[in-house]
Every structure is written in structure tokens, then in C-alpha cells.
Image: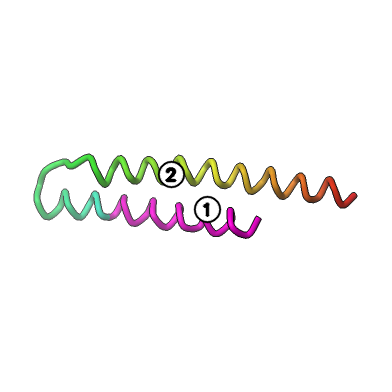
């Protein structure tokens, strides 16, 4: 379960990094680019999936112990 928790934190950090990168590129070059934006959306989706999977693993481990 610790592996999935670390992945969730990684995806959270990547989301913020890609969102800021998208805004910096727009501020510097004054054009919309989609690569950093798509990567931010992808990392947000992976964050949601990994958080849900971590919660499922946590609930399963609590049910087995009781």
C-alpha cells in the first residue's frame, strides 16, 4: 500500500508542476500550448485512480484484520 501512496503523492506533485509549467509557457510566449495542459490532466486522472486504489487496499486490509 505504501507504493500506491507514494504514487499518489507523485501524481499530485506532477499535476501542480505541469499546471504551473503551462501557465509559465503562456506568460512567456503568449500562446496556448497543449502538451503541459494534457500532462496536467493526465496526472490528475492518475491521481484520482491511485487514491481510489489506495483506499480500496486500505479498506480490504482493515476488513481482513477484523
Q: Is residue 57 left or right of residue 20?
A: right
Whole-Å distance between the Cαs marked 2 and 1?
A: 10 Å
Secondary structure at badge 2 equals helix
The residue that appears at 11% across and 43% down in the rendered structure is 31
Q: Residues within 10 Å of mark 2 (few under 14, many from 20)?
A: some
Residue 19 shown left or right of residue 31 in the figure: right
Colouring: rainbow
Q: 54 or 28: which is nearer to us?
A: 54
Identity of the residue drawn at 58% across and 53% down: 4
Residue, disc 2: 44
Which stretch is magenta?
A: 1-20
Q: Nearer the viewer, residue 25 or 1?
A: 1
Q: Residue furthest left?
A: 29
| Residue 58, x across and y down, in percent | 72, 50
The picture places residue 38, in percent across and down from the top left corner, at 30, 40
17, above or below 36, in the image:
below
Amino acid at each position: 500500500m505504501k507504493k500506491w501512496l507514494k504514487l499518489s503523492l507523485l501524481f499530485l506533485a506532477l499535476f501542480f508542476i505541469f499546471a504551473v509549467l503551462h501557465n509559465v509557457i503562456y506568460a512567456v510566449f503568449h500562446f496556448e500550448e497543449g502538451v503541459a495542459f494534457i500532462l496536467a490532466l493526465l496526472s490528475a486522472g492518475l491521481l484520482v485512480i491511485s487514491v481510489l486504489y489506495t483506499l480500496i487496499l486500505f479498506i480490504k486490509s482493515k476488513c481482513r484484520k477484523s
